Amino acid sequence: MSNQEIENNKENFFSQQDSIPNHVAVIMDGNGRWAKSRGLKRSLGHKAGMDQVKTIAKHANRRGVKALTVYAFSTENWKRPLDEVNYLMQLPVEFFDTFMPEIMEANIKVTMIGIPDKLPRKTKKVMENAIKSTQNNKGMVLNFAVNYGGRSEILAAAKDLAKDIAEGKKNPQKVTEEDFESYLMSSVLGEYQNVDYMIRTSGEERISNFMLWQNAYSEFYFSPLAWPDFNEKAFDEALAIYQKRQRRFGGV
Ligand code: FPP
């Protein structure tokens, strides 16, 4: 979209700036089908998906989103063919090699949730470097879920809490939901840890072990578009739908 189109869209869609969701989480589905429908290899779908992360990160930041979590690789994705896994694992390297200047210019802060241990050395290093070099940035947080699974995150938090209880550092009777949240990997997102808007592309309507705790009260949006086609206009349309939702958090 041109800058003029982006501005026009903003005027058309958004009357109340304050109803922009703070934390948007995205299941970027449909890369493989996008590629197949064009007679391309699946890896080219993931490459196009990576380019769309750049576009949507810049756009979400411009719209005032505070945190954007993208599901780049799940704990279940290791089951894919080895060449696809290898391709997905080198995407963060390519992403930060090409996108770091724009990340710095937009003041975007990079964080990660997931288990880094199993990642190839180079992938782990590039994530660590990006997190370190953007740690003082004050714009939107771009949070990568890599080797991430919602259940394993909750289980790890429960184990850490149990350890602190066993060591007498916590009183089990006094543990609150907020205390528990501080044990989750997503605590890197601070006050924006819980998801406000969960977007899944490509017509699939399921949660796939993604941020199970954090999605407790989020609004859901399912787009028929494949992730590589989910452009700025599609994101604005999703935001416009969010603004029409009434969030009651269990109240009336
Ligand atoms: C699901 O589509 C997508 C993934 C498993 C990978 C998503 C990764 C990216 C979009 C790139 C991430 C970018 C960085 C910077 C790490 P699918 O392959 O399951 O699609 P299909 O259902 O059509 O086969």
Image (spheres, rainbow, N blue to C red):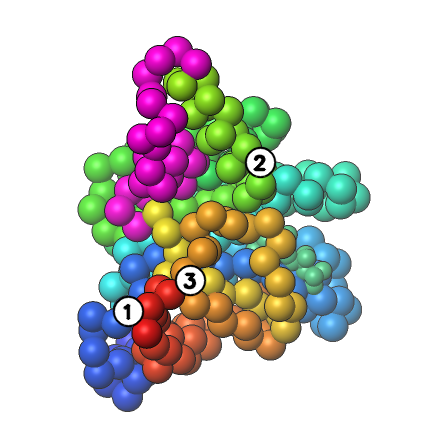
From the image, tell me which residue sits under label 3: 218
Q: Which residues are magenta?
A: 166-192
Q: Quadrant of residue 32?
A: bottom right
The residue drawn where x is 37% and y is 78% is: 245
From the image, tell me which residue sits under label 2: 152
| Main secondary structure of the magenta stretch | helix
Eye-nearest disc, 3 or 1: 3
From the image, tell me which residue sits under label 1: 20
Amino acid identity at mark 1: Ile
Are discs 2 and 1 less than 8 Å apart at CB? no
In terms of secondary structure, where does tag 2 sit? helix
Vertical comparison of 248 with 120: above or below? below
Q: Can you say which quadrant of the picture contains the N terminus?
A: bottom left
Amino acid identity at mark 2: Ser
Mark 3 vs ligand 1: CB under 8 Å?
A: no
Q: Residues within 10 Å of mark 2 (few under 14, many from 20)?
A: some
The residue drawn where x is 30% and y is 60% is: 22
Q: Is residue 187 magenta?
A: yes
Spatial CA distance of label 3 from label 1 is 13 Å
Percent of width and height locating residue 46:
62, 55
**Can residue 185 be seen here?**
yes
Amino acid identity at mark 3: Ser
